Amino acid sequence: MTMKRTATQRLADGLVVLSCLLLLADMLLILFLPALTYFHSGEPTFMTMAQLQATFAYDFDDGLGNLMRVILYEVWQSPETAVLALFSLGCAVGAAWIFLQGIHVSANVADGESFSPKNAVCFRRAAVGCFLLALAAAGRTLWQIWQLGSPEPLLSCAALLIPLFLAGGLLCLLLSALLHGAAEIKAENDLTI
């Protein structure tokens, strides 16, 4: 006889599916981020996005070759596009790490292990990912301040990400500590019964 799943477990099942889809989308995005950065820079030296699309329409193999050249070579020729590409890739990898931790926590909750030491570890790992993303955003902001020679980048989206990810990391550490304490209390209660 199987036990009836609680609403929390069903919600966790849905969260596992959603997190897996987000992780898959993030992984696909990582493949094309350097090219998107190159075309977003507004100063493509090799070819524009319209030229690349026209090449794909004419000959798929040539279009793929040109796209690979942009991803593997052209984007890294300018310091501005290289820094933006590295920042974007760092954010995408950090997001993938956080999604992966979310999948682990959601799967544990779906299995009925809400107050598990494993969940506390996953939240601690997610906190590290948040802090690394905040560090990457700070690095990008400082790079822009140095490049422009003005404090204008402090008003950018990258600068906004710094306190956002710091707060997310602190929240994950708080949840990790709470889950760790709850797991200890649960273990003590299980021993007394």
Image: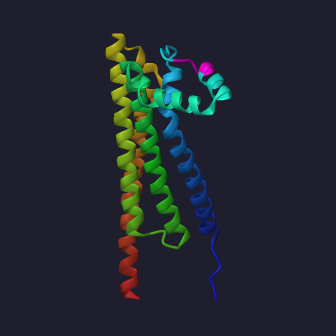
- Check the picture and name the quadrant holding the C terminus: bottom left
Q: List x then y, in percent, for residue 80.
A: 39, 19
Residue 150 visible to the viewer: no
Identified at 37% across, 11% down, the residue is: 148
Can residue 63 be seen in this snapshot?
yes
Question: Residue at the top extreme?
Answer: 149
Residue 82 drawn in magenta: no
Residue lying at 33% horizontally and 22% vertically, measured from the top left = 142
Q: Nearer the viewer, residue 39 or 47?
A: 47
Query: What's the residue at 49%, 32% (across, down)?
Result: 68
Q: Position of residue 161 (x, y in %)?
A: 44, 32
> Residue 1 location in percent, x, y?
64, 89
Kindly report the secondary structure that dominates the magenta region of the rendered protein.
helix
Q: Examine the rendered structure and indicate whether residue 135 appears above or below residue 16.
A: above
- State the residue lying farthest toward the right: 57
Q: Which residue appears at 36% of the width and 66% of the height?
A: 181
> Depth check: 35 or 11 in front?
35
Highlighted magenta segment, given as a residue range: 47-51
The quadrant in which residue 93 appears is: top left
Q: Is residue 50 magenta?
A: yes
Which one is in front, 172 or 20? Answer: 20
Question: Residue 26: horizontal and vertical position, in percent?
Answer: 53, 44
Q: Is residue 66 left or right of residue 175?
A: right
168 relative to 21 in the view: left or right? left
